[in-house]
Each structure stands twice: as structure tokens, then as C-alpha cells.
Image (tube, grey):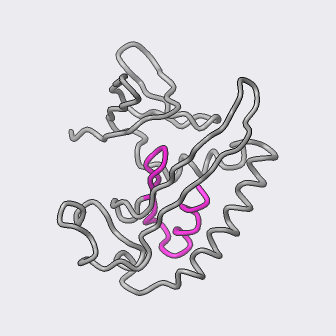
Amino acid sequence: LALAETLDSLSPGGVKIKWPNDVLLGGRKVAGILTELSAERDKINHVIIGVGINVNHGVGHFPDDLKDSATSVRRFLKRKVSRVELLQSFMLQFEREYALYRKSRLAKGHARLRKFSSLLGQTVTVQAANHRITGTARDIDAKGRLILDTHTGQVPITAGEVTILKK
């Protein structure tokens, strides 16, 4: 959410989040976020967050198999962007979002998270470990789970690789 807000300040309306960890500009992947969690049964010890952003890549920097699905901030805005300024803006936004999250979990960010979603209303397949489920992405709930409408009812999804099915 912090990265989507940061990029939206540069290109209002062009940013979407592909739940759970991709950020899109103009429908193409511009960033990916990976997390690693250390937790016990009732306690989170720490979370490590890795963020990769395609900032000033030109068309020629992408391999042929990614040219249609990936982009960069520069490619989308049609101008070079200061990586330092982008990082500073992102880190400030991240600090704000983290403070809000610590105070009220997703209560303050939930509506914005839904606004940025690229999946709501789409028919999707989610692959998680050895389990695969298909349905319509109906919502992202207050816990950050993707809610799928399936033939057996609503199913909350906590993690997985999402593929949008073509109609």
C-alpha cells in the first residue's frame, strides 16, 4: 500500500496492486514485494521485507518475454526519475503506513487497499503450495485476505500466486 501510494503521487490513477505482492503501473508489473516471517504460535518475532522496483529501466532493459508484462516508472512516465527521491518518498510513506497499521491494523488502510486492487471482480485462480482454487475475487477483508466467491461459497485466501483468467 505504501508503494502504491508513493507511485500514485507520480502517476495518479495508473497504479494497481495485484494481491498479495505485485504493484502494477498501466497494467504492467513495476514492483514486487517479498516477505519472510519468523513467528511462533502466538507471536511474530520479525518480518523481513524486500522490495524491488523497476525505476529507470528502458524498453531494451527487459528480456523479450517480459516486455509486454513488465514496465518501469521511467517507461510509464516517459521521463527519468530520481531513485533517491523515489526511495525517500517511499520510506516516508512506509513509515506512515506502518504507524497506522501498528495502531489500528488495516482499519485505516483497508479502503485504500481495495481502491488499488487489480483483482476485485475478476475470475482468478490461486495456487498455494499443492492447493489450487478458482473463483471471483470479491473482496480484500480487514485482515488483508483475498476473499474468493467459489462454487462452494466464500473462501478467504491468505497467500498464493494469483492468475487472472481471461474471459
Up-down relation of residue 119 to residue 70 (above or below): above
- Quadrant in the picture for residue 32: bottom left
- Quadrant in the picture for residue 161: top left
Q: Residue at x 35, y 27 (%)?
A: 135
Q: Quadrant of the N terminus?
A: bottom right
Q: Position of residue 64 (x, y in %)?
A: 17, 66
> What range is drawn magenta here?
1-23
Q: Position of residue 63 (x, y in %)?
A: 22, 67
Q: Position of residue 30 (x, y in %)?
A: 40, 64
Q: Is residue 72 magenta?
A: no
Q: Residue at x 37, y 39 (%)?
A: 162
Q: Residue at x 62, y 40 (%)?
A: 37
Q: Is residue 8 magenta?
A: yes
Q: Position of residue 62 (x, y in %)?
A: 26, 70
Q: Nearer the viewer, residue 61 or 94?
A: 61
Q: Nearer the viewer, residue 113 or 64?
A: 64
Q: Residue at x 43, y 66 (%)?
A: 14
